[in-house]
Image: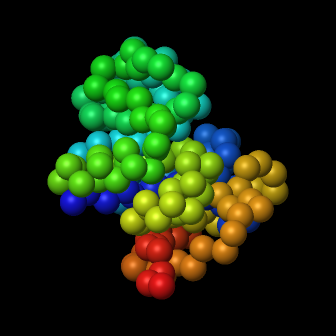
Amino acid sequence: MGRIVSNFFISLDGVVEAPDQWHFPYFNDEMGAAIGAGMETASAFLMGRRLYDEWSEYWPKSDDDTFAPFINGATKYVVSHTLTEASWSGTTVVSGDVAAELKKIKERTGGDIVMSGSATLVRWLLANDLLDELNLLIHPIAVGHGQRLFEDTPTYPLRLVRSTTFTTGVLHAVYAPAES
C-alpha cells in the first residue's frame, strides 16, 4: 500500500509561500541529498490545481536535467473540482469523492505518493486521515508574511519520526500523524 508524503520548505514562523524568495541561500548538498532521497521513493506525484497550472506550463518546456525528467515522466495526480482534462503527460484528475479516490490510489500504489506546494491540500489530507508523513525543511529565517502551513486549522497531533540538522541550520524534520 502506498503512502502520501508531503514535503515543504518552511520558515521558522511557518511560512511556506514563495520559498523562491527566501529558501535558496540555505540550499546545499545535504538538502539536495534529502530531496533526492525523497524522489527515489516516489512512485507518483500529487498536487493541487494551482501547482498543476504552474508546473504543467513550466516543466514540459524546461531544459533542467535533474528535476524535469523526473516530474515529466512521473505519474501525476491533480486534485481539482474545476479541471476536467489534464494536458500534461501522465496526469490524472482526481475529483468527485476525492477522499475515496485517493484511498484507491494509495491501495494500488506500491511506493510513496509525494506532494508539495499546497498547504490547503496538506490540511485537507490531514483532516481526512490521508497524510502519512510530513517532511519539513525548516529554514532558520522568520519571513514575517505569506501563507503559513497551518492557518486557522483544527489541532493535529503529530509525532516526530526523525530529524537531521544541516550545516546551514536547516532542520529536516519528519512527522507522522500521532496514534489516536
Question: Is residue 175 rendered to the left or right of residue 67?
Answer: right
Question: Is residue 148 rendered to the left or right of residue 129?
Answer: right
In the depicted view, which residue is nearer to us: 170 or 124? 124
Instruction: Name the residue at 67% across, 46% down.
Output: 17
Instruction: Name the residue at 45% across, 56% down.
Output: 6
- In the displayed orientation, state which residue is furthest to the bottom: 180
Question: Is residue 72 rendered to the left or right of residue 98?
Answer: left
Image quadrant of residue 122? Answer: bottom right
Question: Is residue 125 rendered to the left or right of residue 5?
Answer: right
In the depicted view, which residue is nearer to us: 118 or 124? 124
| Vertical relation: 45 (above or below) 113 | above
In the depicted view, which residue is nearer to us: 11 or 165? 11
Instruction: Name the residue at 52% across, 78% down.
Output: 158
| Vertical relation: 32 (above or below) 157 | above
Q: How many marks?
A: 0
Please state, as top left, top right, bottom left or bottom right, where the N terminus lies in the image: bottom left
Residue 132 in percent (x, y) is at 39, 65
Render colour scheme = rainbow
Instruction: Name the residue at 73% across, 50% down.
Output: 147
Residue 71 in percent (x, y) is at 33, 33
Residue 69 in percent (x, y) is at 27, 29
Image quadrant of residue 127? Answer: bottom right
One can see residue 118 in this view: yes
| Vertical relation: 97 (above or below) 62 | below
One can see residue 135 in this view: no
